[in-house]
Amino acid sequence: MSATRVFVARLAGCGVFDPAGDRVGKVIDVLVAYRKSGSPKATGIVVEISGRRRVFVPIARVTSIAPGQVITNGLIDFRRFTQRGQEVRVVAEILGRKVNLLDGTGFANIEDISIEQSKNRDWQVTELFLRRPKTSASPFARGTTLFAHWDQVTENHMGDDSQSASQLLATYSDLRPADLASALMDLPDERMVEVAEELDDERLADVLEELPEDEQIEIIQELDDERAAEVLDLMEPDDAADLMSNLPEARTEAILELMDEDEADDIRKLMQYDEFSAGGLMTTEPIICSADATVAEAMALIRRKSISPVLAASVFVTLPPYETTTGRYLGTVHFQRMLRYPPHERLGTLLDTELEPVSATTHISVIHRTFANYNLVALPVVDDENCLIGVVTVDDVLDHLLPEDWRTEDEGGA
């Protein structure tokens, strides 16, 4: 059933479909344009399509809006979305703004906006969902909420009327790190940094891993050394090393001194390698087991929440010690192979010894060909004594294969 009145914050993340029912992308934001009189008019939606590219779909091409989905007439211009001066993004720019209530009861913050389809099929802003300031000092207290029509409020243009970072983050709360990184990149630089600083350490670490180098540096430079150390501690060592190699040497050392000693040692090792070598690409935290470990024990390690999917695809078997730099590398056991054997089976009987490890100095071009030739997810890296020192994963290879601006470049020459 098609709706004629919807709240914009609930639209964010909804699927966008063509008339045949094929998914085109997902809603990122709704654009409205202010008018000389009356409430703002919705002009269209920002849709994220394949490749994380944002395009504009005029509201006239939206045929219906139903719970969890937006249906279009299928006519979509695939040129990258560019915001025009008279348009305002509801989620990114309006939610969280202060408005004065014309009944004289003070001000409130906009938490959501409804748009409603009129008889002439235009969509315009009608009702606002507002929250008053909290009246208690308790950190758990929240202000009362109310609904108001657009003509019952006036925007507060005195002082700071910008959208709060916490409000914007509440809207983005369900986004995956890669999608949140894309959303941050759409914001002005100062706004991007402000919102990033509001993220908790773990979420910020995940987002920094997904951002391009320039944005990473811009954000980390705004953090004090202690918080920077906490965030970098939570990043994958190879990503943290790449980021820190672009910071001033004095700042790098100050941050390393504040980090966990083992994490700092791993990053120092990685920073010694050339960026375009196996050593520069590898992570130093693969899953490592002994040959006597069982399938059940290896599966327990794979199930840990902190393990990324690419690292969970393989277990690397070595002689002791079982942390990088390990004892002599013996072979790899792939996750799919473990699924075919009983829990008590020893890993030593399941080794893939045909996968040749590479040295830390192996050039990235050789690594690309190796991944392509053998359909690999991860490739072990060993030192001169054949001891495991790290693993290159397919996500790191892809990052280097794609152009630096792959997150923002147009596709198909559009």
Image (cartoon, rainbow, N blue to C red):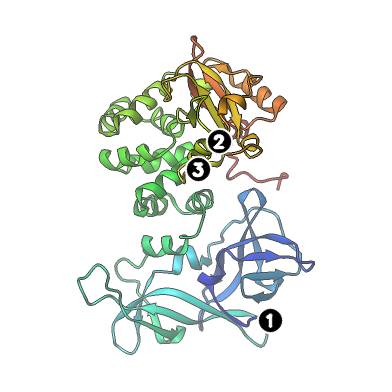
Q: Hey, which residue is sitting farthest right in the picture?
A: 20
Residue 211 point in image, percent of width and height: 49, 42
Which numbered dot is residue 204?
none
Q: Report helix, strand or loop for mark 2.
A: loop
Whether tag 1 and tag 3 are in contact, CB under 8 A, the answer is no
Amino acid of disc 3:
Glu
**Dot 3 alpha-carbon crowd within 10 angstroms: few under 14, some 14 to 19, many 20 or more:** many
Give the residue displayed 50% in from the left and 68% down from the top: 90
Is 383 located above or below residue 89 in the figure? above
Residue 60 point in image, percent of width and height: 69, 73
Q: Nearer the viewer, residue 117 or 328?
A: 328
| Real-space Cα separation, disc 1 to disc 2, in angstroms | 54 Å
Give the residue displayed 47% in from the left and 19% down from the top: 319
Residue tagged by mark 1? 1
Residue 131 point in image, percent of width and height: 36, 77
Residue tagged by mark 2? 344
Q: Is residue 138 left or right of residue 60?
A: left
